[in-house]
Amino acid sequence: MDGRTVVVTGGFGALGSVVAAEAAKAGAVVVAVDVAPSAPERMAGLVGPKGFTLPGVNLTDLDATSAAMAEVKARTGRLDALVNIAGGFAWQTLQDGDLSVWDKMFALNVKTAATACKAATPHLIANGEGRIVNVGAASAAKAGAGMGAYAASKAGVAKLTESLAEELKTLGVTVNAVLPSIIDTPANRADMPDADFSKWVTPGDLAAVILFLASRQARAVTGALIPVTGGL
């Protein structure tokens, strides 16, 4: 990853911050982008001396997202990889739930990824060896009760990945997605205190797969939807 500029959306979150830190350790110039109005103090240490944060970016707004990508290019001289981690989760049954949650899940999971991809793609094409890595979900293949809106939105991320991979495959840009099961985060432990955490995917293990797909070595892989499911 030496010398490569990597943009991580949702970069202040549990997974995003780990991906940012691991990319920086691998020698990348890391830019953590997030909708949060300010970056946590710990982010400066995680992105390292060459990286920086861009808080307050509405990733559902193309103008705002394009401006962020242009700033990355202006400050680092290049944009090599986009890792789309920004997203959200909601559990509700269709019978008892609110249909507005379906719009919210689409906006948080599909629209943020599509907007970031559209804004970053010109820079990735210009680079000639660009990478896009999206975060889908294993549950999109088989959704349980209450997972309809979330799983449908993550299925949208999978189809975005496949379609964009075909669109960009002759332009030097690869597009892939990871499909994790339950990620071992403090929030998930709090929500499921009786679960066997040892079977969950750690953020570090998931980050390792993401960063391989964002690397030069993954040039022959595109359009892949890679399950990262740990012991589940």
Image: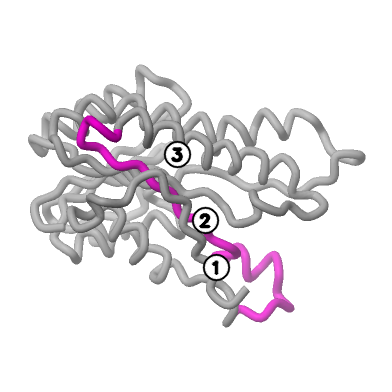
Span highlighted in magenta in the image: 169-197
Question: Label 3 neighbourhood size at 10 Å, few (<14), some (14-19), many (20+)?
Answer: many
Tell whether label 1 touches label 2 (CB within 8 Å): yes
Residue 144 vs residue 20, the one in the foreground = 144
Query: Going by the image, does 54 lie left or right of 152?
Result: left
Q: Residue at x 35, y 57 (%)?
A: 210
Q: Which mark is residue 7?
A: none
Q: Residue furthest right?
A: 95
- Name the residue rendered at 34%, 66% in the picture: 208
Query: Quadrant of the rendered structure where residue 105 is?
Result: top right
The residue that disc 2 covers is 179
Determine which residue is flagged by label 3.
Answer: 161
Q: Say which label, 2 or 1, has the lower sequence index.
A: 2
**What residue is drawn where x is 31% and y is 55%?**
213
Looking at the rendered image, the quarter that the N terminus falls into is: bottom left
Asked if the magenta segment contains residue 167, the reply would be no
Residue identified by numbered label 1 = 229
Q: Nearer the viewer, residue 44 or 152?
A: 152
Q: Secondary structure at mark 1?
A: loop
Is residue 56 visible to us here?
Answer: no
Locate residue 204, reporting x and y percent: 39, 70
Residue located at (19% from left, 66% from top): 25
